[in-house]
């Protein structure tokens, strides 16, 4: 199903529609008959209720089901119909904030701990993908992070040296090494290993499918309208139904209003992405590395198993996606032009194009953990360019918190943390 010109919206508790993406999305077209689930009518009960059926909710649901916890998941639309459908499927441990910048922000020890957790999360995603009953197109790839301009080489070198000092296995490539492998020249680049690509729509839908078979109760078209306390438990009203739970995990994606927490400081932007028609020959693309750059906002590219190029970027500081075909096509043509600049022998043709909302936290770290203002309610908000990795980290961390196990990342990503010197209570994407 190609959804050209479609608009996907969600409703936050205030009742106003929030548009998350516009255009023709590639990934849902790869599985037009993905599993569907009933909506909740009447009353249900569980120990842990997950709100949100995107990447965060799906991996959390599978993690809790496989840990033997009594859990349910509600999604106001259909599984993977929100931001997960517009995800471009680059799975990288490097963040929008570099390791060196993060070290300056939170200290080198904690920054390395966080980056190490991101790298481990990619490994774990591979294990999860291999355990699923369907192919989700998870393939290991290296990433190529290049200097957009010659003057960026200095900061790139600093990043490489810190990665190298902490044994992340990065490589430094100079201009000649790059030119020997690609049809373009750049001053310098870092090559990181241990990353991956996947089909995010198939991954999310298949995780939920597997989790449902392992005990997760799943309800689509079941919006969270209110949360109340009744007899020591939470009562979540969904319109036609009511579900009671001891704990709640809010995996509500890029609708922070739905999280209802004053601790969440986020910035919502919009970004653009395209998928080309399959190309007959990508031999000039060295090992199909995933490409991204030092410029902000940055361009990023990957290939699909059938030879398409997925490219994204051109971020703009506005929450609402563009809502006309002409505005979208203008940016899509720019992305096509960027592909040709790097690979002048290719003749990419546009097949899918979309604009989507994405979120960043105020300090470039996800919000994961129990809301200190509302005991029993947990936030799982993987805001950032590699939100799929954050979701995986978050699912494991939430599981640990629910069963009382220590997790070294809990303090770093906790909603209790401070940001920019302020207490929060006081104040590569798509």
Image (cartoon, rainbow, N blue to C red):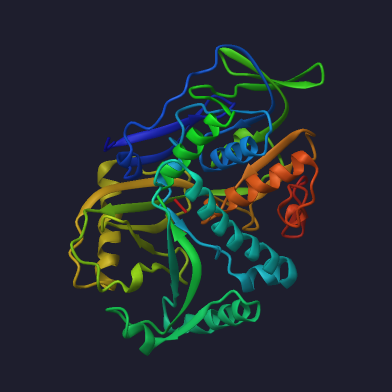
The answer to whether residue 42 is left or right of residue 140 is right
Residue sitting at 33 percent across and 38 percent down? 31
Residue sitting at 77 percent across and 21 percent down? 233
Instruction: For residue 26, say whether it is visible.
Output: yes
The vertical placement of 177 against 78, above or below, is below
Q: Write down the quadrant of residue 370 in the picture.
A: top right
The answer to whether residue 345 is left or right of residue 291 is left
Q: Nearer the viewer, residue 117 or 67?
A: 67
Q: Nearer the viewer, residue 412 or 165?
A: 165
Q: In the image, residue 261 lies at what x, y percent?
A: 70, 38
Q: In the image, residue 284 lies at what x, y percent?
A: 26, 74
Q: In the image, residue 69 lies at what x, y percent?
A: 69, 33
Count of numbered circles on the image: 0
Q: Write down the quadrant of residue 402 in the picture.
A: top right
Residue sitting at 66 percent across and 47 percent down? 396
Residue sitting at 28 percent across and 60 percent down? 334
The answer to whether residue 325 is left or right of residue 291 is left
Q: In the image, residue 201 lies at what x, y percent?
A: 41, 42
The vertical placement of 313 against 210, above or below, is below
Quadrant placement of the N terminus: top left
């Amino acid at each position: 199903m190609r959804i050209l010109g479609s608009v996907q919206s969600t409703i936050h508790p205030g009742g106003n529609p929030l548009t998350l993406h516009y255009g023709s999305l590639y990934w849902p077209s790869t599985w037009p008959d993905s599993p569907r689930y009933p909506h909740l009518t009447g009353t249900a009960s569980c120990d842990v209720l997950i709100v949100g059926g995107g990447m965060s909710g799906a991996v959390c649901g599978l993690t809790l089901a496989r840990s033997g916890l009594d859990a349910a998941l509600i999604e106001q639309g259909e599984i993977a119909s929100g931001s997960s459908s517009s995800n471009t499927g680059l799975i990288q441990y490097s963040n929008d904030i570099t390791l060196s910048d993060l070290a300056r922000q939170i200290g080198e020890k904690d920054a390395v701990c966080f980056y190490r957790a991101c790298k481990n999360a990619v490994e774990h995603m591979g294990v999860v993908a291999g355990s699923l009953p369907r192919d989700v197109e998870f393939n290991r790839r290296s990433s190529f992070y290049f200097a957009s301009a010659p003057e960026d080489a200095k900061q790139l070198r600093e990043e490489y040296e810190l990665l190298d000092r902490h044994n992340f296995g990065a490589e430094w490539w100079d201009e000649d090494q790059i030119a020997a492998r690609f049809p373009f020249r750049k001053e310098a680049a870092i090559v990181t290993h241990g990353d991956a690509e996947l089909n995010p729509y198939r991954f999310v839908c298949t995780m939920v499918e597997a989790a449902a078979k392992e005990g997760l109760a799943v309800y689509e078209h079941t919006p969270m309208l209110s949360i109340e306390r009744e007899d020591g438990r939470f009562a979540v009203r969904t319109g036609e139904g009511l579900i009671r739970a001891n704990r709640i995990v809010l995996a509500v994606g890029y609708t922070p209003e739905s999280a209802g927490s004053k601790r969440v400081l986020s910035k919502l932007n919009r970004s653009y992405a395209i998928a080309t028609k399959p190309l007959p020959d990508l031999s000039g693309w060295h090992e199909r590395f995933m490409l991204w750059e030092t410029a902000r906002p940055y361009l990023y590219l990957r290939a699909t198993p059938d030879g398409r190029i997925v490219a994204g970027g051109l971020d703009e500081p506005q929450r609402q996606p563009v809502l006309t075909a002409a505005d979208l096509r203008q940016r899509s043509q720019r992305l096509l032009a960027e592909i040709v600049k790097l690979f002048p022998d290719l003749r990419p043709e546009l097949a899918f194009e979309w604009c989507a909302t994405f979120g960043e936290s105020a300090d470039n770290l996800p919000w994961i953990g129990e809301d200190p203002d509302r005991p029993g309610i947990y936030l799982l908000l993987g805001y950032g360019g590699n939100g799929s990795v954050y979701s995986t980290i978050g699912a494991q961390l939430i599981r640990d918190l629910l069963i009382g196990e220590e997790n070294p990342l809990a303090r770093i990503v906790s909603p209790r943390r401070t940001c920019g010197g302020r207490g929060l209570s006081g104040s590569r994407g798509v």
